[in-house]
């Protein structure tokens, strides 16, 4: 019998507790090489880069020599980030835009094309968990638009406009929360009543499915990876899950640990055994923990759904 979503959540929490916290990171790190990353001359695009894991990735990549295009809404926070870069080899270029709006995402991709900017690395990191359903001015549930559809539109636009260099790397920042759910396309914009945690988990499952599709479609030109960062102390977690954040405050990872696997993937571009796999703490892992989560919709059905959502947004514009 397949356990209920609530039972899976409880099992998941107790099983993964040491692994996803700073304990798992500290133990695994003992076995890793201490070589530092060098991204000199590379151009990166990181979404959701004004706080948390995205901010740390942007800072680390810029300090390792990359020119990082950092995207978020808060211009002041992006400016503070740019001011914190200590290396004279790398820098931050800020883009203050709302990635929940497909018109904005499309114009961002067009701006890069018009300015001849192409990327070695794209990190689809922007993500949020909401406690109640809200809709964007384009009519999509805000979490779905930010966490899934915007990633799809940005990535496809960049690929189609030649915005990714040959041999480039795309990293999709998912979450361990996706282990609790199957891919359910009809529920991507939330159920009645709305459950923010469940809806977020579905978005994170969709990211992993999308990554699988992209690996199969563009894998000869681009290195695609999905990953999750463990449980990291960030403003996003503190706001969306205050009780979880307070209860685990001493055990949550530092953003540096949350960013580590993304930086390592971009630097080492490891081979992947199975297109479905997800990376965590520098190792690839199965995207399924509960057998029931294998019985969901397929990645090709997801892509058809996202294509029609994208088309609808273009026609409405
Ligand atoms: N922290 C964890 O434990 C954890 C665990 C699993 C997965 N993750 C994933 O890791 C990623 C980063 O999470 P985090 O915890 O670092 O979150 P965070 O601290 O809340 O950062 C989210 C970033 O996204 C930006 N953002 C949010 N909505 C946006 C929008 N509409 N347009 C543009 N930018 C937007 C925010 O900046 P502005 O407000 O300035 O726009 C911020 O820079 C997410 O995909 C999350 O699902 C995190």
Image (cartoon, rainbow, N blue to C red):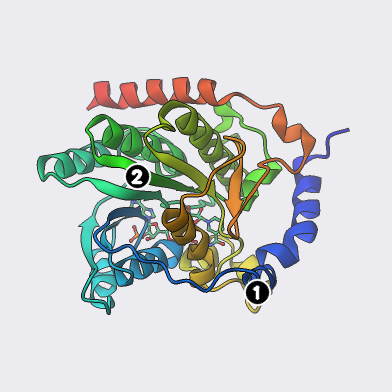
x and y, in percent, of residue 104 in the image: 24, 41
x and y, in percent, of residue 62 in the image: 30, 67
Q: Is residue 263 left or right of residue 19?
A: left
The residue that mark 1 highlights is 30
Against 84, residue 167 (above or below) is: above
> Tag 2: Cα neighbours inside 10 Å, few (<14), some, or many (≥20)?
many
Q: Quadrant of the N terminus?
A: top right
Q: At 27% across and 75% down in the image, what residue appears?
A: 85
Q: Earlier in the sequence, mark 2 or mark 1?
A: 1
- Dividing the picture into quadrants, the one containing residue 271 is top right
Q: At 44% across and 26% down in the image, what residue appears?
A: 217
Q: Is residue 299 left or right of residue 155?
A: right
> CB at mark 1 closer than 8 A to ligand 1?
no
The front one of 55 and 85 is 85
Q: At 30% across and 54% down in the image, what residue appears?
A: 44
x and y, in percent, of residue 164 in the image: 28, 41
- Dividing the picture into quadrants, the one containing residue 67 is bottom left
Q: Is residue 149 visible?
A: yes
x and y, in percent, of residue 264 in the image: 48, 60
Q: Are marks 2 and 1 in contact (CB under 8 Å)?
A: no
Against 201, residue 102 (above or below) is: above
Against 7, residue 84 (above or below) is: below
Q: CA distance from mark 2 to mark 1?
A: 29 Å
Q: Quadrant of the C terminus?
A: top left
The front one of 14 and 275 is 275
- Dividing the picture into quadrants, the one containing residue 218 is top left
Against 35, residue 108 (above or below) is: above
Marking on residue 306:
none
Label 1: state its secondary structure. Answer: loop
The residue that mark 2 highlights is 168
Instruction: Kindly give the residue lying farthest to the left in the view shown.
Output: 114
């Amino acid at each position: 019998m397949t356990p209920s979503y609530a039972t899976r959540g409880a099992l998941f929490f107790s099983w993964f507790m040491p692994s996803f916290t700073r304990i798992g990171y500290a133990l695994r790190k003992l076995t890793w090489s201490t070589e530092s990353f060098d991204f000199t001359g590379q151009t990166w695009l990181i979404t959701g880069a004004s706080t948390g894991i995205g901010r740390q990735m942007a800072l680390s990549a810029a300090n390792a020599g990359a020119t990082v295009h950092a995207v978020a809404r808060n211009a002041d926070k992006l400016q503070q980030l740019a001011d914190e870069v200590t290396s004279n080899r790398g820098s931050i270029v800020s883009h203050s835009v709302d990635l929940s709006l497909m018109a904005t995402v499309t114009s961002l991709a067009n701006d890069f094309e018009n300015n001849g900017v192409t990327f070695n690395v794209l990190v689809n990191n922007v993500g949020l968990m909401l406690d109640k359903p809200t809709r964007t001015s384009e009519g999509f549930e805000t979490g779905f638009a930010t966490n899934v559809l915007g990633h799809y539109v940005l990535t496809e636009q960049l690929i189609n406009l030649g915005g990714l260099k040959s041999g480039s790397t795309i990293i999709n920042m998912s979450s361990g929360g996706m282990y609790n759910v199957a891919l359910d396309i009809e529920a991507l914009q939330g159920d009645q009543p709305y459950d923010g945690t469940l809806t977020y988990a579905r978005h994170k499952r969709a990211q992993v499915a999308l990554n699988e599709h992209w690996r199969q479609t563009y894998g000869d030109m681009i290195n695609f990876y999905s990953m999750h960062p463990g449980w990291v102390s960030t403003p996003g977690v503190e706001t969306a899950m205050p009780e979880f954040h307070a209860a685990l405050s001493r055990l949550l990872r530092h953003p540096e640990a949350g960013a580590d696997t993304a930086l390592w993937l971009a630097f080492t571009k490891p081979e992947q055994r199975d297109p479905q796999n997800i990376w965590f703490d520098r190792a690839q892992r199965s995207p399924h923990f509960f057998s029931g989560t294998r019985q969901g919709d397929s990645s090709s059905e997801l892509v058809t759904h996202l294509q029609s959502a994208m088309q609808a947004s273009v026609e409405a514009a």
